[in-house]
Amino acid sequence: EADGINAEYGVCTDLIHGINAEYGIARHNAQLAQSVVDSGAVPLLVLCIQEPELSLKRIAASALSDISKHSPELAQTVVDAGAIAHLAHLTLNPDAKLKRQVFSALSQISKHSVELAEMVVEAEIFPNILTCLKDTDEYVKKNCATLIREIAKHTPELAQLIVNAGGVAAVIDYVGDSVGNVRLPGIMMLGYVAAHSENLAMAVIVSKGVVQLAIALQEEQEDHIQAAAAWALGQAGRHTPEHAKAVAQANVLPTLLQCYLRAGSSEDLQTKAKKALKNILQKCVHLPALEPLLHDAPPNILKHVVAQFS
């Protein structure tokens, strides 16, 4: 029995050395990732993540992540080898370096399609993984938030499941506690949830999501993060006058206008800030929130403001 385990361990270790050489390239190229799959490596990698040796688990999870990221077909081969259940189990492992890779692999599987995201959710990762949004390791937190974002983006049903598990409230706390690129997947997740429907947008609003998005829009220095916050606020405010009022009362309209008019803003930030302003203004009948824009807005924005006063 012991000899059998040692032999299997030896196979895994040899495989890892081989994969290490190959998957460094597989990381960048779907064709090379396919050649790793064709060599029969995936079932062995799934065996490796079940081994007690931590370094083996880490490298195998990393390889599975790199194979899964390129296409739905490659991700499906990883799923067909039974990887999801074992990866889901490892989300509770105390080792930060392993958890980084595990959340990355589950994100790379979930991102491709509704079906793959549903299979990850069916492995009962909620609500357990929400504790990882408070992990001491920045990369564990970020990869966990990225996984939640990749699931939430697909359908209202998947987003609602995350809301029911307490996921929106947890991500809002995460956005409040993070800065910079670590904050970004949380901001995007809230935007995706709010985009799906009136009710889901209201779930983001009542959990004080708009307040945290407004703080992020104000605080963040980098245009791509401000652009994501602007987009998410536009998604929350675009549904009804009630939604628009909730967003406008967080005093985001002057900040959005500033982002749009600022000479140094990237094209992406200007586009997203303008679109968010338009989304909110076309629904906003709460006049006190609109008044500050009467003095500063250029004609193409002002027309939406004036329309609400008329």
Image (cartoon, rainbow, N blue to C red):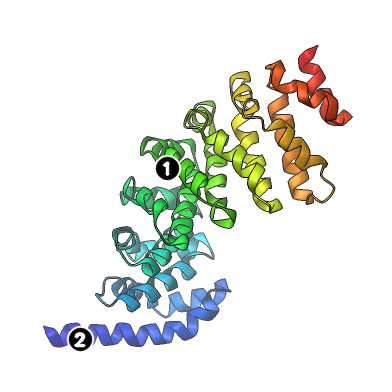
Relative to 8, 242 lies left or right = right
Can you name the residue that lies furthest to the left here? Answer: 1
Q: Which residue sits at x=83%, y=30%?
A: 297
Is mark 1 in CB contact (under 8 Å) with mark 2?
no
Q: Position of residue 76 (x, y in %)?
A: 43, 61
Earlier residue among tags 1 and 2: 2
Q: SS class of the residue under badge 2?
A: helix
Q: Which residue sits at x=43%, y=53%?
A: 116
Q: Position of residue 127 (x, y in %)?
A: 33, 45
In the rendered image, the vertical position of residue 308 relative to residue 273, given as above or below? above
Q: Position of residue 54 (x, y in %)?
A: 31, 75
Which residue matches tag 2?
A: 6
Q: Amino acid at mark 1?
A: Ala
Q: Is residue 296 visible?
A: yes
Relative to 85, 41 lies left or right = right
Relative to 77, 287 lies left or right = right
Q: SS class of the residue under badge 1?
A: helix
Q: CA distance from mark 1 to mark 2?
A: 43 Å
Q: In which quarter of the view is residue 192 placed?
A: top right
Which labelled disc corresponds to residue 209? none
How many discs mark residues in the rendered view?
2
The quarter of the rendered structure image containing the C terminus is top right
Q: Is residue 77 visible?
A: no
In the rendered image, the vertical position of residue 139 relative to residue 289, given as above or below? below
- Which of discs 1 and 2 lies nearer the camera? The answer is 1
In the rendered image, the vertical position of residue 150 relative to residue 250, given as above or below? below
Which residue matches tag 1?
A: 170
Q: Position of residue 208 (x, y in %)?
A: 50, 32
Q: Amino acid at mark 2?
A: Asn
